[in-house]
Amino acid sequence: MNFLLRSLAILLPLAGLGYSWNSTRQTAAQGVEWDVPVTGYDPRDLLRGHYVRFRYVWPEDPASAMSEDYPAATRLCLEGAAPAIRRATRLADQDVASHCQGLARAPGQRGIPPQSSTIPRDGRLFIPQTDGPRLEHALADPKQQAILHFRLRPDGEIIPMRLSFQPKPSPRP
Amino acid sequence: MAERKLKAWVAAGLIDAGTAERILAWETQHSRPVALWAVVGLAALSIGLGVISLVAANWAAIDGETRLMLHAALMVALGGALWSLLAQGGERARRWAEAGIFVFAALGLGFIGHLGQVYQTSTPTWMAIALWLGLFAPLLLGGGQGWLSATMLAAGCIALPWMRFGDPALGWSNGQAGPGLIRAAIECSAPVFLAPLGSFVGRASPRAAFWERLKLLGFGYGIGAISLFLIGSGFGDWAHNDPQGNVDTALVASSAMLGLAGLALWRADRSLDGTAAAGVFGMLALAILGANRLAGHGLLIGLLFMVLWAGLGGAALHAQARRAFQLAVTVVALRLIILAFEEAGGLLASGIGLIFGGVLILGVAWGAMRVSRHFAPAQEKAA
């Protein structure tokens, strides 16, 4: 390979990865941070590899939660003072969102046309290898509630940041 | 080994000691360091895999950005070493450059995954592969020396469309066959163009081994994918849930891609090998169309499969490729045996059936062996 081609072929991947690093870093730093309770996605398969799978427990109104299959819902409106979510409601594309302090969405899932979005239902958090057993144990503990601290990017994508645990309020009779 | 044989021949009076010495000297000088190549290749593979698993294992103690920094520093250092290695021409430098390119590209793929871990992004896999391919294909194409680079490049080219096909967010592989299926079929057929590419560039390149391997990989992908498609066609109609005829269009598009690849191959290489390879692509293109018409009819699809492989055997005969011919004969024989058991399901249920089945297998195997021995081209040409 001649001098120019050789330099280009080696510099291209290095420059491209550097650019990708920088842009990933910038987008990851944007947004508002929130807390949301989560439950382990599947107790038998909590940790596959070194990440935790979880399901969000959005503090939804009973009325809103009733409409579990509100088909047009494409995003979730978060109200409250960050990081505490007071209320989460499902919104369709045409609904007014001006009262929301945050809008969360997830990329389209199976069975939904491409380029559409949906309510975030589950996610995963990469964790250090050594934290696996501790987190698995804590997630399985019925007396503790797992809280996910996440950053909500302006485009609605959820960036999970860390898991913490707090005692669950005793169930009302 | 050669030395032991030579001593025996000298002892038996077949050659004299002087000849033996000259043979030994010539062999020593012309021996290809196959073992060394293999060791270097294995070492590179093990380093590459090790690096990936090291990244995947999340070195817990180190802060994410520090880890990325270390990873990047490693890549910059390796890039510098590669830059000077690729400038040298010797055999040794080429071997090290090949291993270096492999590790460099593996580190690059690992880096993209590493970014996802540190910043907790949920980018689809196909996007990561597309980015990797875009950044590293020029280096692999321009600096690749042998099978390691060629395989890596071909694996990326094949994985990308299939990952896109499998991504639920793109909605191509849903129960309903949408119009996106046509685009997916074209994308998934595209890697066969590695064959004409390898053939076209390889003739004038000093790195003939790399291009030859790339050509074979594109060729093998086409044959393997269509064979699997034919086997799948035996189980049911692809278009059972397709009122708009998207599956038909997708398969016609796929067939056209294979036909075009065959045409390009024929334009690139008019030799005996080239025309045989172009013919193979033509047969594959026809096989897709045939399988689409016959899908769901197990027996007819089985026959089509055998006709296709008989055709491949014919092409191998035309190109004087002994091993390819023998492979084709073996595949046809195996399919014939499986077909017999499929069509006469009772063969396994009774003693007589079992005996008959065993005799049938022996007969087919014997026939295949005779065909393979008698009609196979005498010598193996470089495939």
Image: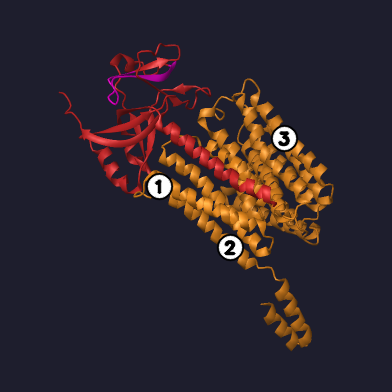
Chain colours: A red, B orange
Q: In the image, is residue A120 part of the stretch drawn in magenta?
A: no
Q: Mark 3 or mark 2: which is in front?
A: 2
> Which residue is rendered at x = 42% and y = 11% of the image?
A95
Residue placed under numbered mark 3 in the picture: B257
Task: State which chain disc 2 sits on.
Answer: B
Residue B179 lies in quadrant: top right
Element type at mark 1 = helix
Question: Residue at the location (62% across, 57% down)?
Answer: B84
Looking at the image, is B28 positioned above or below residue B166?
A: below
For badge 3, the amino acid type reads: Met
* Element type where label 3 sits in the image: helix
Q: How many marks?
A: 3
Residues drawn in magenta: A71-88
Q: Pick whichever of labels 2 and 1 is earlier in the sequence.
A: 2
Q: What crowding class fits label 3: few (fewer than 14 Cα within 10 Å), some (14-19), or many (20 or more)?
A: many
> Which residue is labeled 2 in the image?
B40
Residue B66 is tagged as: 1
Residue located 32% across and 45% down the image: A132
Distance from disc 1 to disc 3, alpha carbons, whole Å, reads: 46 Å
C-alpha distance separating marks 2 and 1 = 31 Å
